[in-house]
Amino acid sequence: MEDLAREYVTYARQFSNNGSLSKAFDLYIMAFEKCPAIKNRHEAEFRGVINKLNEVLAKADKVEEIFNNYGQAIGFYPTNMHIVNDIGKYLYKCGFYSEAWCHFNKALGIDSGFVNAEKNLNSVKNILMQRWHFRMLNDKIRNEAYQAAIGDTINPCLDSVLDLSSGPCLLSLFAYQHNPIAITVVESNEVMTQLSESITQGIGIYDIIILNQKSTTMKYLDIGGKRSVLITEMFDAGLFGEQILQALSHAWEYLINNIGRVLPRKAEFFIVGGNCDRLHHKYQLSWESKNMLNISNLDVHITTSNQTYDCKDVHFFKDLTFLTENQSVLEVDFNDPNDLKEKLTRTEPYEVNVKAKESGTINVYIGWFNLYLTDKITITTNPQSSKKAITWQQAVFFDTKNVNVKADDTITLNVMLNGGKLSMAPSDSTNQFIRVSPDTMRFMNDPDYTKMINGCIGMASVYLGQIADISQISIIDLCPFPLFGFLMVKRGAQFLTCYAKTPEDKCFFEEVFKANDIPLTNVKILVGEELSIDAFRNDKYHAIFCHVLDPCGDVNNSSMEIALHLKDRHLMQGGLFLPADVKIVAQVASSQWLDLSNQVYNENACGYDVARHTSRFQVSQNFDIDLTNLEHTTLTEPVDVGSLMDQSRTQTVIVPVTKAGEANAILCWYKIELMEELNEVSTNKGTSFTYATAFLIPKITLTTDKPLKMTRASGPNGSYKVSFEIET
């Protein structure tokens, strides 16, 4: 039987090499059925076949076949952490988050140091309970204001309460203190509904009705009768972005009785003009970058994805200067159904006159709001206020033109409220912006990295000139914009293969090439999913520039897999691979902001026992951190903990503690060396194309007399985790 099984494996390999993956998979299964003893010898190659086969099936949307394949595979490898983790990944892609959570947990149960499974589990937790929920529950200013306002509004034994989309139902707990006749919670998010039930029942409250449904689909009988008080916190940075106007308009018609009141009572939205290059360059291509690309006449903005503003904690940006007075845009009375309808149906813009306080260039407009909970209690998101709520960020309107002003100048802005969402109408309605992805914008607006790429062109040309004439040079450049390849083609390189994340990026690339008289026949642009290992066939290239870091600071596993494959299979002998090295830098720190974004403290939630129910959603890693904006205290010096290109299992370094304190995070960023003997560029800056990441740890007290043993564990395709223990 073993001889026959081996023969099946031989045939399976042949079919796999010929691309007949389904037949290869069936033959492996037949081999394992004939002789289970051989399965462990062939586990790695079998996993390679099933992964490739399932990628093909995924593109054909044959989900059922994918899970059938995994069902057969797990029968032979029930404790294989890689297969269990892979099943979890497909469950995650299909939206079965609870089932994916179970599989990632199972993989970690097999090997607690399995980096990829831990990273995937964090992703599920972030989907199920977004980090802003932790900010909200820890927002003591907001929570105490709502608690007081609800107490002032509810008449005990007379009022009935409808809590509209309040997440973990903290507002209902405030209302319960005042003995209303009934409380009904309507929450469309299933996870938040379950969390609300856990919190209320954990406290011993069983008579709050919690419904998992969208309120605008409901009538009064669905909630047990019309209610006299509606409480809500259904707001975003732009006040109306969570469709609060639609929800309240429907509620007044179907869910609130004729003596009903809404809390908050009113809201008011404000706008202020400012100057902040770091914010501005997140959304619009800088003058320096346009000059570098010879497109100074073009206005290049990020793709909007139907978003009219971005959400940022603008008070963290140290280069932000407010150049105008705060100006009210509109006020809405949530207790006036007619006002709500007027806002929803309005097509005319709000004309807002903003007065300059000082001279300068306005390159960013920031929106914030006041919630008038009652006549006496107000919550603000004003970034200039020391008493602002931290639940909501500020709205940054990015599709605008720069305006030079002098003190006392007045600027007229047109603010739209289309479909219940705020936007700023361009000052020049005839202006057409060229759109690029945020990745491309971030990359090209990184002055240090683009300068380093520019600076290496001469050295790269000399190096490549030793193996071929410049007119024969072929290049792969997979950066968000192929700056290296672009500059080399301008020098005379023959051909460039590059990657555009979106069709808009492709159009932008072509505009740049045309502006620099580069024939499009000399360029091949792979778009979106066209980028794969198979896209390069058997071709060889003189220079390959890969890009493996996402803007959030994470390693893109797919990009790393492609990078390693290109370096191994497609680089000519003696060819140039860039970057030469990407080092991981780690530093132990203490940060209250990171803590409050990952862990609820009951004292911030007005003493209610919320923390033990939210703790299972805590993650072990946080991404997209601008360290120049992060409030934190460093407790060690930064140290290199290895190279991304080094796939070894672990790497350890001894690190002295430079400042005693309570550590709760290990901050990580990168140092990039494009070519050997060139200076490295650090990503630890606010203008970097990629931000930092933080590994979150239980609080631990450090002293300067005991150094740390810091360890970096590696997973496949660049995944890693950094941890430490105190040396004894």
Image (cartoon, helix red, strand yellow):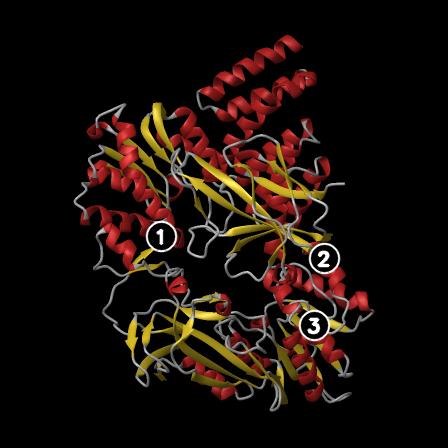
Secondary structure beneath dot 2 equals helix
Is 493 in front, or is 268?
Answer: 493
The quadrant of the image that shows the C terminus is top right
Outermost residue, top side: 3
In the rendered image, which quarter is residue 677 located in? top left
Residue identifier under label 3: 170
Name the spot of residue 556 as percent of width and height, x first: 49, 42
Q: Is residue 538 visible?
A: no
Single out the mark in the foreground, 3 or 2.
2
| Of callouts 1 and 2, the N-terminal one | 1
Mark 1 residue type: Pro
Name the spot of residue 63 as percent of width and height, x first: 54, 40
Mark 3 residue type: Leu
Relative height, residue 617 to residue 467 (above, below):
below
At horizontal 56% and vertical 23% (from top left) the residue drawn is 45
C-alpha distance separating marks 3 and 2: 16 Å
Secondary structure beneath dot 1 equals helix
| Of callouts 3 and 2, the N-terminal one | 3
Name the spot of residue 123 as percent of width and height, x first: 59, 50
The quadrant of the image that shows the N terminus is top right
Residue identifier under label 1: 447
Contact between marks 1 and 3 (CB within 8 A): the answer is no
Contact between marks 1 and 2 (CB within 8 A): the answer is no
At label 3, counting other C-alpha atoms closer than 10 Å, the crowd grade (few under 14, some 14-19, many 20 or more) is many
Residue identifier under label 2: 615
Q: Give the left or right position of residue 20, taking residue 298 as reference.
A: right
At horizontal 54% and vertical 13% (from top left) the residue drawn is 10
C-alpha distance separating marks 1 and 3: 45 Å
